[in-house]
Image (cartoon, rainbow, N blue to C red):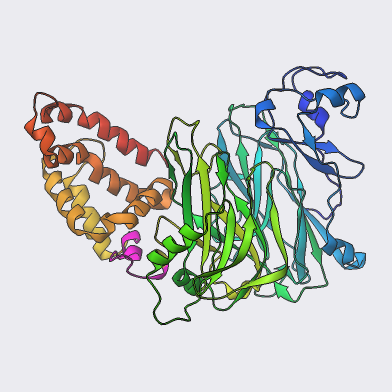
Amino acid sequence: MSESRSRSKFTLRDLCSQDHSVNDTCTSTAPQPPSSCYHSSPTRGAPCYVPARFRDQCICEPYDNDECKKKNTWVTCDTTEFRCDALDREDPNDLRNITIQFPRTKVPSSETSYYCMTFDLPEDEDLHMIATEPIIDNAYVMHHILLFGCEPSAELMTSPSPCDMKVRYCENLIGIWTVGFQGECFNPEAGFLIGNIPKAYKRVAMQFHWNNPLKENDYYDESGMILHLTQNKRIHNAGVLVVGQNYLQLTPGEEKIEVVGTCTNEMSKMRLVGPIHITRVFNHMHYLEVSMPTVTQVTETIETLPKITEIMLTLFKWTRLPRDLHLYTGYVKLRDLSFDEVYSYDSPVFHVHREAIEFQRGDEIRTTCTYKTKGRKKTVFHGDATSDEMCYGFLTFYPAENARSPWCVERRNTDPFSYYTENVSQNCPFRDFMNMTHPDTQRLHTRILSHCSHLGLCLKECISVVRELRANHPCLQGDIHEYLRERARNGGMETIQLALFFSSIDSCNTEIATMDCPVINSTPDQTSASHIAKFSPHLIFLGALHFITTF
């Protein structure tokens, strides 16, 4: 970490400088097509968008040459310098710039990689972060950069290391860069608090998402961010609330698929301790042809309210606009918070509200994403890779103290947050189930592991135990069951016991399906039970590997 104003640049010439010579009319192919590039200006780099269909081409240099201009019409460059009113208004003596940057790090030869590193911030004085700028070293692979504020108990990662979507105990999003952004400039009423007082961030985690679709093995990156801090603290501390939908299953060949994620009035009551004021909204999806949702505000001022499901249907039917966030009260629409009629991942838009919009406890936020899967041959799921999809809205707000949690995201029609805050959710004792030292959980695991094999072989004594548990145990039913399986697949080493538990339960899937399917039992000539059973060890072994090798 440094406080230098120096900045590395990624120039258009860099796109033609790898593995081949460069001349004024470069026509050769770059080794890995970029998702963005940087055209050098007198003082700073500025984003340059290369459309996906042209990413196997090379940019003609010198870029400003008359002949090259004719050949570079497929490149859209914004060479303007990053400007921020908040910085322009500050006394230069009050400003302090900090550069946080990865050391030169080898990019893995896999399509999607998440790497994180933590940085300790200065504690000698209390400051507000009022703007950020990106330092993009390798635009060939850089998908996005996220900056998270950490709790004091957060782990220290002194070098870039593989990580999940976020570092443990670093869950408060305070900075964003993605393709097309020059930087962030925050509302003059609020800033992110840095310093030594209890509520201030003393450590941040910077997360890189590298996208390397050709799985090249010779890429390196040392990107980062410049944090603009001021001694002239704002009235409020800023925060970011994430809304949207965590469950996506987009079938191929569809002209239009709408997905809704709602931060319901009950969810907002759980997360907020007072009203918040929204100053900025940023929609996030990936590359399917899409349009995006609504944010809705609802207040329970009427005694005879309809059921929430009916309200959602009514509002959804009424708000057919693509790619927008709507605000409602009393189940009546107040206004749009964002509207991207044509969403572009490569040219995202910050929807700025200079007059902050109040959002109260019990109000509702709805995010609606519309996808087109006409050209796809496989189902698309929620996921981290650009070949997967997402449906999120990021809302910058103040005061940060009025939000208990920075996430208000649905999974289907359920609230995963409630699993952790309530001892019993959907009749499932979730926290006890996830606690491998709890006596009930230990007895359950012992029962399964003593009757079933997690290595793919279906034991006869396993079948009756699994059927009984699936019929009666609430944690093995419905949405919460699917969520637990998702945690087992993606939760890391802390959920390895849960993965073994589910792989053992799944060891007799084929046999149980055979017993429960009258068509199979009554038509032995078409597909006999013995024929299915013959292959079941191999199929189930693959299923067990799916769980176990994740870790």
Looking at the image, residue 317 lies above or below residue 258: below
Q: Is residue 524 visible?
A: yes
Q: Position of residue 506 (x, y in %)?
A: 25, 42
Q: Position of residue 407 (x, y in %)?
A: 53, 62
Is 226 left or right of 148, judged from the image as shown? right
Query: Residue 335: which quarter of the image?
Result: bottom right
On screen, 381 above or below 468? above
Q: Quadrant of residue 281?
A: bottom right
Could you tell me which residue is drawn at 39 percent across and 61 percent down?
414
Magenta span: chief secondary structure: loop
Does residue 319 sit above or below 503 in this rendering? below
* 313 sits to left or right of 344: left
- 415 lies left or right of 73: left
Instruction: Report the residue at 52% width, 72% height from top.
Output: 363
Count every numbered label the image shows and give the total: 0
Kindly identify the residue that appears in the image at 47 percent across and 71 percent down: 265
- Counting from the top left corner in percent of width and height, residue 36 is at 72, 36
- Residue 148 visible in the shown view: no
Out of 258 and 125, give the one closest to the viewer. Answer: 258
Query: Which span is picked out in magenta?
Result: 421-435
